[in-house]
Amino acid sequence: MTTKLSIIIICILICFGCSKSENRNLSENQTSQKTKLPSGKEIKINSINGMNFQNGESALVLNYETDISIENIEELKKEAEDVWKIFRYDVEKEKTTFGIIRASHYEGSGSYRKGKGYGFIFKMREDENWFLEEDKK
């Protein structure tokens, strides 16, 4: 399977849902609670789930809420890289091929909030170093 096709499949699964496995903890914090990043910023992690692909590859997906607008990709990318610094350990512990970080930004309050999301895909190279897929371009 080509890398571009893999990325497209992962993006589709992120947007339309995927089969979920058990929730996992990140840095010993329960999901749906605030988690402090290395930069000092706090984020709310909504879920961490595993995904298995038919080709045998797997991913760990972290969904979190951000206060950064989805349109501000550069700032969002910086934040995702900060999240990756702690999420990477969970991904490596699970021995998955991909680590996916999905940021959601919501506007409004109460029972109706409008939201948008954006995903960042980290993949392990053959030399066992991780890279952000969009940096490969």
Image: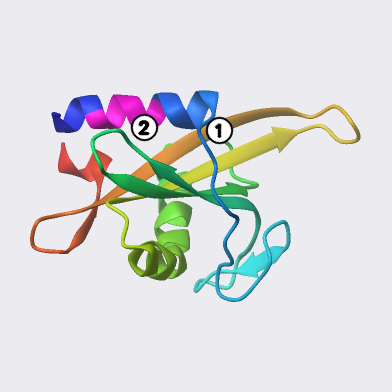
Quadrant for residue 45, please give it.
bottom right
Q: Which residue is mark 1?
A: 117
Work out whether mark 1 precedes mark 2 in sequence or the reverse, and give the earlier one: 2
Q: Relative to the observer, which residue lies in front, 21 or 77? A: 21
Is the Cβ of the residue at disc 1 closer than 8 Å to that at disc 2? no
x 48%, y 55%: residue: 79
Q: Is residue 113 left or right of residue 130?
A: right
Q: Secondary structure of the magenta portion, mostly?
A: helix
Query: Relative to residue 73, is residue 83 depicted above or below?
Result: below
Q: Which residue is mark 2?
A: 10
x 32%, y 55%: residue: 96
x 65%, y 71%: residue: 29
**Mark 2 surroundings: few (<14), some (14-19) or many (≥20) residues within 10 A:** some
- As shown in the figure, which amino acid type bears the numbered disc 2? Ile
Q: Relative to the observer, which residue lies in front, 116 or 14? A: 14
Quadrant for residue 120, please give it.
top left
- As shown in the figure, which amino acid type bears the numbered disc 1? Gly
What numbered label is drawn on residue 26? none
Task: Pick out the residue farthest to the left.
Answer: 127
**Mark 1 surroundings: few (<14), some (14-19) or many (≥20) residues within 10 A:** some
| Quadrant where the image shows the N terminus | top left
Q: Which segment is the magenta one?
A: 6-11
Q: Is residue 29 left or right of residue 4?
A: right
Query: Relative to residue 26, is residue 123 depicted above or below?
Result: above
Q: Could you say whether the residue bearing mark 2 is in a helix, strand or loop?
A: helix
Residue 26: x %, y % from top left:
56, 68
x 45%, y 69%: residue: 86
Colour treatment of the image = rainbow
